[in-house]
Image (cartoon, helix red, strand yellow):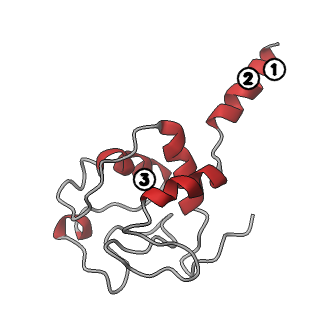
Amino acid sequence: MAALIAASAYTAAAQDVAKGEISFHKCLPCHSIGDDAQNKIGPELNGIDGRHSGSVPDFSYSDANKNSGIVWNEAEFKEYIKTRGPRCPATKMIFAGIKNEQEIADLWAYVSQFNADGSIKKK
């Protein structure tokens, strides 16, 4: 019984790339990702895992974003996506945020799978 409870708890907390792709539709008006990604109102998000904030070529970032010192990783992304994060409050990004922890985890699973060139990382 304990094993069943532990397995179901793990499943509930696991990141789901497919659900993250659905959640990414909230981001699509401003961001793109994948092999044909281009900057829109917001920068393209390829290679976000490990990328310095404010560093996508040919995108006009706010000074707050360029000077935030953020290096994107799972923890930074999860904090930022909730409310744009306290470390970078004066960005151009207008987004209410995502509050649901599971949705945030799924969204990270989706966006972090892309390399800088838009290809999907090999597992």
Q: Is disc 2 in contact with disc 1, using a CB cutoff of under 8 Å? A: yes
In the rendered image, residue 32, in percent from the top left (x then y), is placed at 46, 72
Q: Can you say whether 38 is above or below 27 in the image? A: below
Measured Cα–Cα span from mark 3 to mark 1: 31 Å
Q: In what element is the residue under mark 1?
A: helix
Number of the label disc, if any, that sits on residue 6: 2
- Residue visible at 73% across and 23% down in the picture: 6
**Among the two numbered marks 3 and 1 on one chain, the one whose residue lies closer to the N terminus:** 1
Measure the C-alpha gap from mark 3 to mark 2.
27 Å
- How far apart marks 2 and 1 lie (CA) works out to 5 Å
| Residue at the bottom extreme, as displayed | 58
* Residue sitting at x 82%, y 13%: 1
Neighbours of disc 2 within 10 Å: few (<14), some (14-19), many (20+): few
Indicate which disc residue 3 carries: 1
Question: Residue 41: image x %, image y %?
Answer: 31, 73
Identify the element where label 3 is drawn.
Answer: helix
Task: Between residue 63 and residue 93, name the one nearer to us.
Answer: 93
Q: Position of residue 121 (x, y in %)?
A: 67, 69
Query: Which amino acid type is marked by label 3?
Result: Phe
- Residue at image position (58%, 81%) is 35
What residue does disc 3 label? 77
Give the residue type that dot 1 points to.
Ala
Q: Amino acid at mark 2?
A: Ala
Quadrant (top left/top right/bottom left/bottom right) for the C terminus: bottom right
Q: Which mark is residue 109?
A: none
